[in-house]
Structure formats: structure tokens, C-alpha cells
């Protein structure tokens, strides 16, 4: 059974005036004539035509991340559907239907000369007022721009600072602060390429994002809207992939433009950071032994343990930093660490006293009482460790009694200390109890029943090892991104030394890991101990974390209390993310900082929504001033709408969603027997403007438009330079 979500939209109907849909093959003329008298239906689905290039892949990734339905036609496939009138439009229950609300093409002319498919798309876009995005194309008169040779520029744009124009700020890019820096991550690899030029004489072209023309006072368009022949094209003239910061910053505006801010799906930016092992100690990396005495990567008895623990001054700094940044850290705590410290220091623990005094500055997550490994019993007689087994080969597991004690004792300790603990959230030490390859390929079978007995609803997992949300007993996992600042480093020198050990070759004194398992953090040569942290590690980790944020990934990141102690090496990365975000986005697009339980619920709802969309169980369309969404009963529906949209809540008309990035978005969770009703605000009527009678002159040829070679795609777009995919 499906429910229906109806939206009344005075603005949407205006776009559809004058629509004429030819009769589909086999439809009687009388039926077609009757259908022509009806208001047409336009499905809320995007058509993406791809030639396999990174630009269309980037746009589909943005649609995927937001949960916006789309259909892909891959021009490389022999068995692909033909894009003709019947594919684009038909009739449903006698009513004309436009099957797509927007069209994305790899460039402005991806089909051979005289193609009937391009002709069908042009006719469809004109008849249905459907916008077209040219994902990456040449600047030339037939796209409304001057040819770049001479007055413009074509070439690398690595490191440029693009700008949002006044029209862009008033239009689809209102959520940006004004400047969009292009990445320049490698001095030896070209990472972006663009055609920069001005609107052609006589063209009805509005530039939304531009950049300075090298060596000239003028600026050239990177993204602009070209209106011609009753059609609207968004012309993008720079190469990009889905991981690059410039695309991730601009992607929302591209989607807003083509869907006219009425679409299924939503995307927001969030950045939550968990600090593990609070109240406990973290073992320290030994720069001579290249291992961590006291932990399992050192042989038993090797080295001398030298633990790292926050001081009262470190706590004061964390509290001041949180207050000054307006940002809340989530502290994952081990109460047993304080008990142990007091026992060894005559009952004194000034660090714990300071943390408890500042308890309302932070959020608190149960991290177990003593931070033991809660999976299999570890045999640490060898490096790496293995799971201990009984004589018959059966794995020996940490008992449910011990797991229960670790969870419940830590909760009881927090209650005595007055910590405002959030019930239902748990992160076990080292994410233990959950499967860990290669040693432990399955969860501890005793974990799930204990989670049920302790009412745990959200269980932290390591995104680099266990990324997909899954159920463990009553709990759902919340995968956390590890920031590559090590738990066993409190000082910059230790961090750089261990980084060099892990990511360099054996010939250079490293572990040789990268020789068999290349990652984006592998090093050609060891980092300079004096400059490597600030010059390499901090920028890379900032870029990686910011990439998750800009991709709309709500999953939290995690570091350790050791990183807030001594040299306080965690703050440069956190500050880097917060500062870079503030420089990119306007005040109407704040960086959210949700708690673990809210993140888990969003991941759950997203997964259910995405599964329903991919399986075809969600249908959305508009008819005149109404939008209807059909979805399975009980499925939360997510949508993005213009500001001022309301819905008929059970207790009366209420605002839909909440404001974000110039629109409103949210989840509709309640239904009545008649469905859910949304009402869009009336839009101001734009002033009458006359477009030029003729298109911009095409100096290339008057011949039928033909597909040409792809615009240049630099190496850093085809094979991104490091772009932020998990390395572990």
C-alpha cells in the first residue's frame, strides 16, 4: 500500500503553460486530443545521459547523496534505450506525462550530426519547459559564449578562486559566501581545466559563477544560464569529478537550478567529532621501537609504557575552544580510567574534576568502563595478535557478563558524576565486539543480547572497516570516520614519526605497507619532522574531512583524548575544517553538529528511502499546482522545497521542514487517511523581459550540430589527486 503526498504549487503550474504533448504511438487521435486539454503531469525524476565521463558521474553522485530519483542512459551501451518521443513523454490515465523534470547531458552536443535523439530532447525541453544541464562543455557561440581563443582563456585552472556573481547570489548559488577556491593538491598533476569566456554578443546568457581571465582585467564564465529557442541550458565549462572541493561546493546549486527547488531528497552539511578514551590513558608511540609499548603492536615486555592523558589545562582549553567556536565535542568516556588514576594518586584526579565541572560544555557517550577488547579473547603472544581458541579450535569469546559489566558500570559511574549521558549511545573500546578482519570475521555472539539488556540503540563502528549501517541485536551501527591523527600521539614529533613509519617503503625505513596496499596517504619520501605535520598531514586530513562534509555525509569523525593533550595536535584539523567551511558558505547554510543518536536515525531513514527509490517504490509527479508523492506506508519521505512551504499537519497547517541553504527541507513522518499535503508559497511574478529575436551567431558552422571530441579532461579529474576516499 502507498500513501500520497500532495503539493500545491502556484509557481510550478506557470512553467507548464502551453505544453503540448504529441500522441504516443498507438494512442487514438481522440484520446490524444482529450489529453491535450488536460493539465500535464511532470514526473519528479532527472534524466542523466552519460558518455562515461567524470562530470555526469559527479552529478549522479550528488543526486544519490541527496536521495533524488534519476534515470541513467549510458551512450556507451549497445542495449541502451533510444531517447525518442515515446521514451520522454507519454500519457497516463489519458493525461499527458513528461517523464523527467530535468535533463543532464555530458555536453551540449553528445549525439552524431542530425541525431533524432537530440531533436527529440530539444522538442521535449521546449514543450515541457524542462531545463538542461551541459555537465562539461566547450565555450562557444552555440552555448551562448564567445570562443575563448583570443579574448578568453582555455587551460589549467588549478588553484584559482572562482566567484559567485550577483545573479548567482540572487539565484541558485545563494547559499555560498562568494568565493569558491579550486583545488591544487599536486604541483605535478593537472587537476582541472576550463574554458573561460564572456557571453557572446546578442546571447541571452546570465553568468552565475566566474573567474578572472589570466593576464586580463575581465572575468569569464564557469557556470551560466543560456536561454534560447524556448529552452534553458546551464552551461558548465570546467572539468571536475565528484570528489573535488569546487564541485562539492557548487553541486547543490546545479541541482537546485535544474529542479527549480522542487524535488525529492535533501542534503545538509554536518560535522560531529567524537573524542575517545576520555578519563583514560592512551599508550604512546615509541619512535625508536616503531611500536607502542603496552599495546598489541609491541611484543610482550618490549619497551616502557609512557601513557598520554589530558591535564586540567587541556580540559580548560577544550572548553574555551568549544565556547569560542560555538561547537560541541562528543566525549566518549571510560569512567574506570578516573577510578584507576585516583587509586594511584591518593584519591586525586584534577583532570576528571575539571571535566566534570565543565560537563555541560560537552556531549557524553558511553565508551565502556575500562576500555577492554570485547570481541574474542586476544592471544597477544605474537604480533599481530590472534583470537584465542579452545583445543577443538572453537573461538573463545569475551563473556556476556563482562560486556554487560563494562556498559552498565560506566553508566553508573556517569550517573554518580552527574554527566548528562545520552541513553542508548555506545562506542565500545576499539569498536570491539564487532567483527574485525582478518582476526575476527564475525561479531562476538554475546554482544547483541547484552545490547538489548542495556537498551543500546546506537553502536559506534569504524567506517574504514564496517561502513554500512547494520543491525546488532536491537542496535543500529553508526559508522565513524577515523581522522588520521593517531591515538598514540600527543606530540607532533610522534605523529610525524609514526606517519612516516606507516606510509613509507622499507628502503626508506618504513613499514612497507604501501608496497602491497597503496593508499592516498602513501608517501614518496618521509615527511620532514619540523614541517611535515603542518605542511602535509594537517592540510590532507582537513581536506579529507571537509570532503565528507561537503558530500552531505552525516557520519561522525573521531579522534582521541591524547590528541587534545600535550601539543594538542587535533585542533589544527578541526579548526581547518570549521574555517574552510565558514569561508565557503553563507550564514543560511550553517554547519550542523548533531549527536550520535540523530546521526544514526538519519542514516536509518536515508537507507530506507534510498532502497525504496532504487526499487521503484517511490513515485512523484506534479500536475499543474500540485505535487503527489506515492510511497510505501511508514516510509519517511524527504524533500526539498522553496522557503515558506507548509503542510497539513494533524494539528493544523505547519511549516514544512526547516530552512537550509535558501530552501526548506526535511522528512515527512506522519500521515492521515487522505495523505500528506504540502503547499508552496506563491512566487513573485518576474518582470517581463524580451529575449533576443535570434540566437548568438554561430561562427563554427551553420551545419547540423554534431558530436565532437570530448573537452579535455585533466589527469587529476580522471584519477583524483588525493580526494578523500577512506584509506584504511
Image (spheres, grey):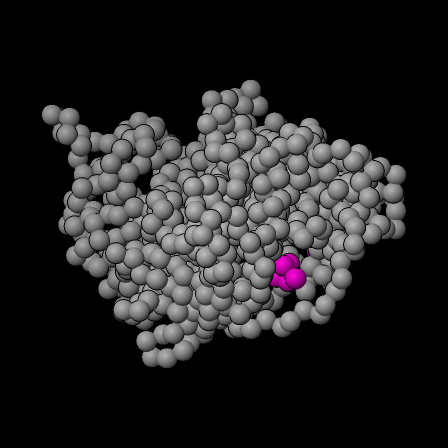
Count the labels in the image. Answer: 0
Q: Is residue 627 visible?
A: yes
Task: Determine if the magenta segment contains residue 636.
Answer: no
Quadrant of the drawing holding the C terminus: top left
Residue at far front of view: 30
Q: Is residue 592 visible?
A: no
Q: Residue at x 25, y 56 (%)?
A: 1
**Left or right of residue 74: residue 630:** left
Note whether 616 is above or below 412 in the view shown. Answer: above
Q: Residue at x 45, y 52 (%)?
A: 30
Where residue 12 sits: x, y (%)? 54, 64
Note whether 113 is above or below 28 in the view shown. Answer: above
Where residue 110 sits: x, y (%)? 63, 34
Give the image quarter of residue 324.
bottom right
Residue at far top of view: 507
Q: Residue at x 34, y 35 (%)?
A: 296
Q: Residue at x 62, y 44 (%)?
A: 122
**Left or right of residue 340: residue 595:** right
Q: Nearer the viewer, residue 33 or 489?
A: 33
**Left or right of residue 101: residue 375:** left
Q: Nearer the viewer, residue 182 or 612?
A: 612
- Examine the residues drawn in magenta and state their main secondary structure: loop
Where residue 530 sits: x, y (%)? 65, 40
- What segment is highlighted magenta in the picture? 171-180
Q: Nearer the viewer, residue 149 or 184?
A: 149
Where residue 234 sits: x, y (%)? 66, 49
Residue at far left of view: 392
Task: Determine if the magenta segment contains residue 179.
Answer: yes
Q: Nearer the viewer, residue 216 or 474?
A: 216
Amino acid at each position: 500500500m502507498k500513501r500520497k503526498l500532495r503539493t500545491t504549487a502556484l509557481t510550478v503550474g506557470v512553467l507548464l503553460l502551453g505544453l503540448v504533448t504529441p500522441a504516443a504511438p498507438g494512442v487514438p487521435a481522440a484520446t490524444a486530443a482529450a489529453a491535450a486539454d488536460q493539465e500535464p503531469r511532470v514526473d519528479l525524476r532527472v534524466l542523466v545521459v552519460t558518455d562515461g565521463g567524470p562530470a555526469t558521474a559527479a552529478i549522479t553522485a550528488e543526486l544519490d547523496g541527496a536521495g533524488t530519483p534519476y534515470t541513467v542512459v549510458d551512450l556507451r551501451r549497445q542495449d541502451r534505450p533510444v531517447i525518442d518521443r515515446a521514451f520522454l513523454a507519454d500519457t497516463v490515465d489519458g493525461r499527458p506525462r513528461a517523464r523527467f523534470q530535468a535533463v543532464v547531458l555530458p555536453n551540449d552536443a553528445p549525439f552524431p550530426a542530425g541525431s533524432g535523439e537530440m531533436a527529440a530532447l530539444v522538442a521535449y525541453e521546449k514543450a515541457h519547459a524542462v531545463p538542461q544541464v551541459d555537465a562539461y562543455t566547450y565555450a562557444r557561440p552555440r552555448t551562448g559564449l564567445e570562443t575563448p581563443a583570443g579574448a578568453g582563456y582555455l587551460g589549467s585552472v588549478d588553484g584559482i578562486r572562482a566567484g559567485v556573481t550577483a545573479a548567482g547570489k540572487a539565484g541558485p548559488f545563494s547559499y555560498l559566501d562568494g568565493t569558491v577556491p579550486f583545488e591544487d593538491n599536486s604541483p605535478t598533476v593537472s587537476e582541472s581545466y576550463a574554458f573561460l569566456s564572456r557571453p557572446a554578443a546578442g546571447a541571452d546568457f546570465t553568468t552565475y559563477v566566474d573567474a578572472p581571465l589570466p593576464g586580463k582585467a575581465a572575468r569569464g564564465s564557469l557556470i551560466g544560464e543560456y536561454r534560447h529557442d524556448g529552452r534553458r541550458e546551464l552551461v558548465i565549462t570546467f572539468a571536475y569529478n565528484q570528489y573535488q572541493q569546487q564541485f562539492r561546493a557548487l553541486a547543490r546549486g546545479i541541482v537546485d537550478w535544474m529542479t527549480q527547488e522542487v524535488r525529492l531528497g535533501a542534503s545538509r552539511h554536518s560535522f560531529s567529532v567524537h573524542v575517545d578514551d576520555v578519563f583514560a590513558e592512551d599508550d604512546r608511540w615509541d619512535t625508536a621501537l616503531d611500536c607502542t609499548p603496552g599495546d598489541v603492536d609491541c611484543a610482550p615486555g618490549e619497551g616502557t609504557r609512557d601513557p598520554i592523558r589530558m591535564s586540567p589545562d587541556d580540559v580548560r582549553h577544550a572548553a574555551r575552544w568549544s565556547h569560542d567556536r560555538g561547537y560541541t565535542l562528543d566525549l566518549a568516556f571510560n569512567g574506570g580510567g578516573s577510578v584507576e588514576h585516583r587509586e594511584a594518586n591518593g584519591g586525586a584526579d584534577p583532570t576528571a574534576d575539571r571535566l566534570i565541572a565543565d560537563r555541560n560544555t560537552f556531549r557524553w557517550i558511553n565508551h565502556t568502563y575500562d576500555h577492554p577488547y570485547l570481541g574474542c579473547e586476544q592471544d597477544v603472544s605474537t604480533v599481530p595478535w590472534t583470537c584465542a581458541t579452545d583445543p577443538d579450535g572453537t573461538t573463545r569469546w569475551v563473556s556476556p557478563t563482562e560486556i554487560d559489566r563494562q556498559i552498565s558500570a560506566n553508566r553508573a559511574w556517569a550517573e554518580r558524576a552527574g554527566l548528562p549521558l545520552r541513553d542508548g549511545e555506545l562506542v565500545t573500546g576499539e569498536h570491539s565486539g564487532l567483527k574485525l578482519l582478518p582476526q575476527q570475521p564475525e561479531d562476538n555472539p554475546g554482544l547483541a543480547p547484552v545490547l538489548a539488556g542495556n537498551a543500546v540503540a546506537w553502536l559506534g563502528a569504524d567506517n574504514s572497516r564496517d561502513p554500512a549501517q547494520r543491525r546488532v541485536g536491537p542496535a543500529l551501527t553508526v559508522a565513524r570516520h577515523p581522522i588520521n591523527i593517531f591515538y598514540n600521539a600527543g606530540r607532533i614529533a610522534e605523529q610525524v614519526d609514526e606517519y612516516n613509519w606507516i606510509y613509507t617503503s622499507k628502503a626508506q625505513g618504513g613499514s612497507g605497507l604501501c608496497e602491497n596496499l597503496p593508499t592516498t596517504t602513501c608517501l614518496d619520501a618521509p615527511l620532514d619532522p619540523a614541517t611535515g605535520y603542518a605542511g602535509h598531514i594537517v592540510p590532507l586530513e582537513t581536506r579529507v574531512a571537509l570532503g565528507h562534509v561537503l558530500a552531505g555525509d552525516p557520519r561522525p569523525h573521531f579522534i582521541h583524548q591524547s590528541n587534545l593533550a600535550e601539543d594538542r595536535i587535533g585542533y589544527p584539523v578541526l579548526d581547518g575544517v570549521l574555517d574552510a567551511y565558514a569561508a565557503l558558505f553563507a550564514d543560511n547554510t550553517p554547519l550542523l553538529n548533531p549527536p550520535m543518536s540523530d546521526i544514526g536515525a538519519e542514516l536509518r531513514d536515508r537507507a530506507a528511502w534510498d532502497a525504496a527509490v532504487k526499487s521503484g517504490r517511490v513515485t512523484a509527479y506534479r500536475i499543474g499546482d500540485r505535487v503527489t508523492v506515492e510511497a510505501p506506508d511508514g516510509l519517511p519521505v524527504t524533500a526539498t522545497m522553496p522557503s515558506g512551504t507548509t503542510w497539513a499537519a494533524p494539528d493544523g497547517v505547519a511549516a514544512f521542514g526547516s530552512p537550509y541553504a535558501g530552501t526548506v527541507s526535511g522528512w515527512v513522518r506522519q500521515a492521515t487517511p487522505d495523505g500528506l499535503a504540502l503547499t508552496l508559497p506563491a512566487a513573485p511574478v518576474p518582470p517581463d523581459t524580451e529575449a533576443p529575436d535570434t540566437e548568438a551567431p554561430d561562427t563554427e558552422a551553420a551545419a547540423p550540430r554534431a558530436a565532437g571530441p570530448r573537452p579535455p579532461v585533466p589527469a587529476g579529474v580522471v584519477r583524483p589527486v588525493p580526494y578523500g576516499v577512506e584509506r584504511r
